[in-house]
Image: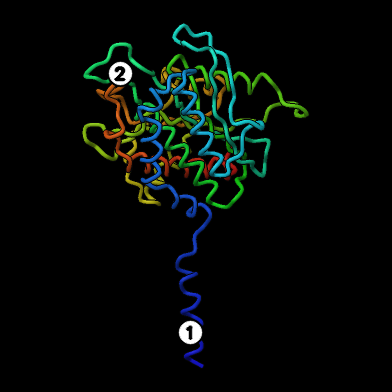
Amino acid sequence: MKNKILSAFLFILPVFVFSQSAEEKGLSTIIGYDAKRFITILASDSLEGRKGGEPGGLKAAEYIRAELKSMGVKPWKKDYFQPFTSTSLRATSNEMRNVLGYIRGKNAYEVVMVGAHYDHLGIRKTPVDNDSIFNGADDNASGVAAVLQVAKAFMASGQQPGRTIIFGFWDGEEMGLLGSYHFVDDYFKNIPVPLTAAPEIKAYINCDMVGRNKDDNTKHVIAYYSPAKEIFRTWINDDIEDYNLNLEPEFRSMDNQNGGSDHMPFMSEGVPIIFYHTDLHKDYHKLTDHADKINFGKVTEIAKAIFLNMWHMANEDIW
């Protein structure tokens, strides 16, 4: 009898030891290999610097769409692409596109979002040291990689979120936040039928340049947050401790002066935000912003923090 009891215990023990919550299951899929793969492809010469509306930018959009589709993330409004027309004098092509995917929440009338711009500066007319492509590995292939990792993690969790999650990849950021402004204008002005109002966007997380070290500090990351949502700062600190993330956040309160990236259109509509950034560096907007300078482990740790932020935003009753 004792042997039978022991055998039964040993049989169920591995199930007990290795059982994971849905949140942990998703988190475990965020790995450095994916960060390196996404960034290396997006920052390759074949994408010609991903300038908005130009062939390289269109290829980048196609690549992001293919990744979302392979993960099982559904297209927002029946199409992954949200086209828009640019009037910017910096644009050589007027036709641009955001890439949008979503996971429907149990409460479809509330939305949380995470996004990053995928465009960069294109090709320099005059080469420097036989290089003419602005690869934009940190700006902002790193942010796109983080958002793709978060999307993959939510799908892998196997749990429908409490609120709908939209994953936004913005075009035309380098020309004046064109894509994110277009999305926000379209979202708040074109009310869907039969709703009397668009589903409320409860929060937005922006990810822009999250792949480099500041003064050789591999843990440093800047986390801007809306001052009215101190709970955001609490989440970040608690999750870093609870999950032993290799990050040391420098918190900065967000105000209307913290411009220059795609959180601004959401702020203008009163949406609370978090903005992850690892600071400017000598390769910012230079031909030398290459993938071999990225700290892929850091991108991965930041993606984990964003996933955990989004898990709170999508599932907790704090609003």
Q: Which residue is mark 2?
A: 132
Label 1 sits on a secondary structure element that is helix
Spot occupied by residue 211 in the image (x, y as percentages of width and height): 33, 34
Label 2 sits on a secondary structure element that is strand
* Residue occupying the point 47% across, 43% down: 307
Q: Which mark is residue 7?
A: 1
Three-letter code, disc 1: Ser
Side of 247 where 182 appears, left or right? right
The answer for how far apart the CA atoms under marks 2 and 1 are is: 66 Å
Spot occupied by residue 251 in the image (x, y as percentages of width and height): 36, 32
Q: Nearer the viewer, residue 14 or 122?
A: 122
Looking at this view, name the residue that lies furthest to the right: 194
How crowded pointer 1 is (Cα within 10 Å; few <14, some 14-19, many 20+) is rated as few
Three-letter code, disc 2: Ser
* Residue occupying the point 51% across, 17% down: 178
Side of 4 where 198 appears, left or right? right
Please state which of the two labelled residues, at mark 2 or mark 1, is closer to the viewer.
Answer: 2
Q: Nearer the viewer, residue 257 or 188?
A: 188
Q: In terms of image quadrants, where is residue 194?
A: top right
Q: Nearer the viewer, residue 174 or 15?
A: 174
